[in-house]
Image (cartoon, helix red, strand yellow):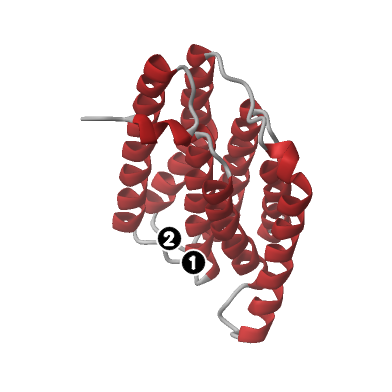
């Protein structure tokens, strides 16, 4: 199997994530993206990087992205008894149109670059994920969805590094992983505390915080 097929499947998860209003759906899509990135990394990097670097990348994608992070987020929504973002239906048409426009524009832009070292499918998926992650952060009001947007953005960064070549220095991967782990952990604790005080996870409540 070629990694391009998995990259295309990864891109197809983006519109679905953008319009889904159930948080558990977001987390399942994150787990699916982790599995797809695991397959992409294995097919793309096998034989091109050291076994140590290869092992670390596969653990990062399969164990962390596909299992630990979604499981951690599932526990957060279960503990706080939150299920969905009710604001999504009001914006669904505009959001899906924007996401499709992002994907098409990224594909056209990749073709315009006309670089023989640049893999168009990888580049399209990575730029699309980066922009969709930012879009989720900007248009959604819940902290949970902001975490999801950040994770989608980070997946885009991972794919972008693959789009530029097969070499992925381990020190870069360690830095990304530690930053991701710290951010998700802190945001998870933050969500729990906000919900205990305000009984909601919308970011508008942050304006009520005082010293």
Assign a secondary structure to mark 2.
loop
User: Residue 182's spot in the image, x, y percent?
Assistant: 31, 38
Residue 9 visible in image = no
- Give the residue drawn at x 35%, y 28%: 190
Measured as percent of width and height from the top left, residue 88 is found at 69, 38
Q: Tell me residue 96's x, y (percent).
A: 75, 52
In this picture, is 100 found above or below 176? below
Q: Which mark is residue 49?
A: 2
Assess whether mark 1 and mark 2 are in contact (beta carbons under 8 angstroms): yes
Relative to 82, say whether 182 is above or below.
below
Residue 171 as seen in the image, left or right of residue 203: left
Choose between 38 and 200: the one closer to the eye: 200
Above or below, 177 against 127 in this view is above
Q: Is disc 1 surrounded by few (<14), some (14 to 19) or many (20+) residues within 10 Å?
A: some
Tell me residue 170's x, y (percent): 33, 55
Q: Quarter of the image for the N terminus: give it.
A: bottom right
| Rendered residue at 47%/39% (across/down) | 147
Q: Residues within 10 Å of mark 2 (few under 14, many from 20)?
A: some
Along the viewing direction, whichever of 15 and 51 lies nearer the viewer: 15
Q: Secondary structure at mark 1?
A: loop
The mark that comes first in sequence, 2 or 1, is 2
In the rendered image, which quarter is residue 19 located in?
A: top right
Quadrant assignment for the C terminus: top left
Farthest-out residue, left: 211
Alpha carbon separation for disc pair 2 and 1: 8 Å
Depth-wise, is mark 2 or mark 1 nearer the camera?
1
What residue did someone put label 1 on? 166
Q: Tell me if residue 136 can be seen.
A: yes
**Residue drawn at (68%, 33%) of the image:** 21
């Amino acid at each position: 199997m070629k990694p391009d097929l998995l990259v295309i499947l990864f891109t197809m998860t983006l519109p679905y994530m953008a319009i889904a209003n159930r948080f558990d759906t977001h987390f399942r899509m994150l787990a699916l993206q982790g599995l797809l990135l695991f397959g992409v990394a294995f097919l793309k990097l096998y034989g091109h990087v050291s076994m140590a670097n290869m092992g670390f990348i596969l653990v990062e994608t399969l164990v962390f992205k596909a299992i630990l992070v979604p499981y951690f987020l599932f526990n957060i929504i279960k503990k706080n008894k939150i299920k969905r973002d009710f604001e999504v239906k009001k914006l669904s048409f505009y959001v899906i149109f924007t996401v499709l426009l992002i994907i098409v524009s990224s594909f056209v832009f990749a073709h315009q670059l006309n670089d023989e070292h640049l893999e168009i499918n990888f580049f399209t998926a990575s730029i699309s994920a980066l922009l969709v992650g930012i879009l989720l952060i900007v248009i959604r009001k819940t902290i949970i969805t902001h975490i999801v947007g950040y994770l989608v953005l980070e997946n885009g960064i991972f794919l972008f590094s693959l789009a530029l070549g097969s070499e992925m220095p381990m020190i870069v991967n360690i830095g990304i992983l530690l930053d991701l782990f710290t951010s998700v952990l802190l945001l998870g604790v933050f969500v729990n505390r906000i919900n205990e005080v305000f009984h909601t996870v919308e970011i508008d409540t942050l304006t009520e915080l005082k010293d």
